[in-house]
Image (spheres, coloured by chain):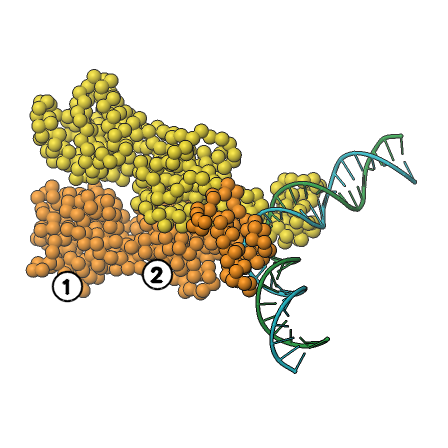
Chain colours: A yellow, B orange, C green, D cyan
DNA sequence: CTTGGTTGGGAAAAGGTTTTCCCTTAGCGT
DNA sequence: ACGCTAAGGGAAAACCTTTTCCCAACCAAG
């Protein structure tokens, strides 16, 4: 009498019709019994439930979707093959949705128009309830037009169409976090080394950097823009500590706020090579909190985390509410970053 | 007469019934016209086609799936949140399948039983045609039981159930590639620094390392096992070049084959710090070909690439043939690695 | 003029579930 | 005994497409 026995894994799925037949009722009654609808004796309901359980009945989602015009499926478009940024976003989305019974189609479109159209068509054919677009850059479009597809669209960490809903990280806020942290620790000459000027985030972060220093009455050094690489971190240290930049002012930086963790890694290595101690002589903060890099630097790197998984969760939940018919304001929502403190900044002067 | 006009993007998808009505035929005829089935005048067929085109008709996949008992959908299970290994596999799978009209459900199960079951149930309910399991380690199971689910299952880069079909990288072959490359370049004292002994691949690669050296009649140094980190790379260099290990033999290594790129990075940095030139004094080869690391080392790192995207493609195509009813031998298929040559090994002695 | 074949197209079932509406029966009051 | 209500359950339509089978009309041959 193993009522909790594993239902035998059917080679061919068992249908409601079979359950109904075995329980001696019609499919209509069976359906109502299992969904808690309709009126029937508690006894009948229980018998049907038990039969379904015993047979391992699971309703065919396709049939349900067809009827309800709702597939409990969303499409996730990304062009980030490498996935450093979109993967956390994606797993945040997936986690938020799986609990609601919603599955996610993974659509990697690279930067290929044809591939993008292919995926969008496939998703639409499969009647996804909505689409989330994500990418590797906040300021670049995916190679597809998602406007007026007939399903709700949410943008996460990628450039939205005008009038759409988008979630992005608050880069300016993140930069403030970093610079203010330096200020609290008593650093006075804070430099900023970042990526290429072609990235919107570079300007957002640089402006926040300037703003904070101005507010605090500290000297603003012109941000050094280069590439997102370690090599540029090395080079930037050379410019900061050799060049006329510092000569003319007579003082060297005691802190460097870097545009990403790779630059920070290069900066830290370059500083050590010239005999400067991190954090005693110079504090360093990175951006992205790319764990594997941040923890491999010596000392481990304090870095700004964009909370991408949380961003993905928000995006997923918002899409769901849109699918549910609830209205939502179009616009760009900036989600706060957080500072992950490790050992590259030192402690406050006194403690 | 814009015959190539964009079909107006319908808020509510247009059905075959509407196409048929507008073309003045029955749905049966309309269906046959669009699918190239049945008999009718070329004129009728064309009229229907044109009507469908004009209305932007796209068949409802859910209805098709219900009828055909085939959803053109597969589930992709992974426990690799960070995605360094599974992301290439995943995008290989996705690329291989999108051209066949098959979409992929992304299911991130972490190492959580409950989450795994949730995803598997959802996939089964949605009548996936098959499942691909992938992970971050070849020698670890996902936290779910995929045996006898009623749909074909393929394992890619994760530990398979017995009797299943699996694709994994040929780690031994990859290691041979690296060591033989060193031999060809005239290196004589080749060391091996790898990860923890708890990883199966560590042993596979170490054994291949020993085999090649034995074949060539070169001295075999006992592999140094540690962690997968840069720090361990540093430490290993200390052991190799300071310890009694080398003292007792009187000679230092002129090549180091590393178990992954992070170790290699640590080794290269440590060598440079002790004034040894890479590649002139010591050649270094890594494993994984993690581009962002391999290209950030100075000099850029030669590394073994596991061809994970290709592995994903193979897995996807094999799953499809299984779904199509073609038989396939159970067992583990090892796919070859390839050596990506950069500058950390130098050139052959003479050219 | 009948027979047989061909051609163009339609009716209906199938796939699995949900939901609306209806029917039967029992219980109750008078 | 009659009428009414409520309870328990079923029939059928709906979702959308594909496919099998069938019908009507037309033509040619006998």
User: Which disc is residue A34 wearing?
Assistant: none
**Disc 2 vs disc 1: which is toward the camera?**
2
- The verdict on a common chain for dots 2 and 1 is yes
Residue B161 visible, this angle = no
**In terms of image quadrants, where is residue A224?**
top left
Q: How far from the left and from the top, in percent, is residue B336?
A: 28, 59
Circle 2 chain: B
Q: How far from the left and from the top, in percent, is residue A152?
A: 46, 38
* Label 2 packing within 10 angstroms: few (<14), some (14-19), many (20+): some
Q: Is residue B279 above or below residue B324?
A: above
Residue occupying image coordinates x 50% and y 37%: A323
Residue matched to label 1: B217
Disc count in the image?
Answer: 2
Residue matched to label 2: B333
Label 1: element kind: loop
**In terms of image quadrants, where is residue A205?**
top left
| Quadrant in the picture for the C terminus of chain B | bottom left
Residue occupying image coordinates x 40% and y 55%: B99
Label 2: element kind: strand
Residue occupying image coordinates x 43% and y 44%: A75
The alpha-carbon separation of the residues under discs 2 and 1 comes to 30 Å
**Label whose residue precedes the other's in the sequence (2 or 1):** 1
Q: Is residue B158 above or below residue A309?
A: below
Foreground pick, A19 / A230: A230
């Amino acid at each position: 009498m193993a009522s909790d026995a594993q239902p035998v894994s059917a080679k061919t799925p068992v249908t409601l019709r079979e359950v109904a037949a075995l329980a001696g009722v019609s499919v209509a009654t069976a359906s109502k019994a299992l969904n808690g609808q309709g009126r029937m004796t508690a006894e009948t309901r229980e018998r049907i439930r038990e039969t379904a359980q015993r047979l391992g009945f699971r309703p065919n989602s396709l049939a349900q979707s067809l009827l309800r015009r709702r597939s409990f499926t969303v499409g996730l478009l990304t062009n980030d093959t490498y996935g450093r940024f979109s993967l956390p976003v994606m797993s945040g989305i997936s986690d938020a949705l799986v609990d609601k019974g919603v599955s996610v189609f993974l659509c990697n479109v690279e930067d290929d128009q044809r591939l993008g159209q292919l995926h969008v068509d496939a998703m639409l054919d499969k009647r996804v309830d909505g689409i989330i677009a994500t990418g590797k850059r906040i300021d670049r479009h995916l190679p597809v037009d998602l406007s007026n597809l007939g399903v709700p669209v949410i943008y996460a960490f990628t450039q939205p169409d005008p009038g759409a809903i988008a979630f992005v990280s608050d880069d300016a806020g993140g930069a403030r976090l970093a610079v203010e942290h330096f200020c609290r620790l008593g650093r006075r000459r804070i430099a900023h080394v970042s990526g290429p000027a072609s990235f919107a985030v570079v300007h957002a972060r640089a402006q926040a950097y300037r703003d904070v220093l101005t507010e605090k009455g500290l000297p603003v050094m012109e941000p050094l823009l280069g590439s997102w690489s370690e090599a540029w971190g090395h080079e930037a240290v050379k410019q900061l500590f050799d060049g006329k930049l510092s000569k003319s002012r007579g003082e060297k930086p005691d802190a460097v706020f870097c545009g990403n963790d790779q630059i920070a890694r290069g900066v830290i290595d370059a500083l050590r090579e010239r005999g400067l101690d991190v954090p005693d002589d110079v504090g360093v903060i990175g951006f992205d909190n790319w764990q594997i890099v941040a923890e491999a630097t010596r000392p481990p790197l304090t870095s700004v985390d964009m909370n991408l998984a949380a961003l993905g969760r928000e995006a997923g939940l918002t899409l769901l509410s849109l699918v549910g018919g609830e209205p939502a304001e179009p616009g760009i929502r900036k989600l706060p970053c957080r500072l992950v403190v490790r050992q590259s900044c030192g402690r406050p002067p006194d403690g």
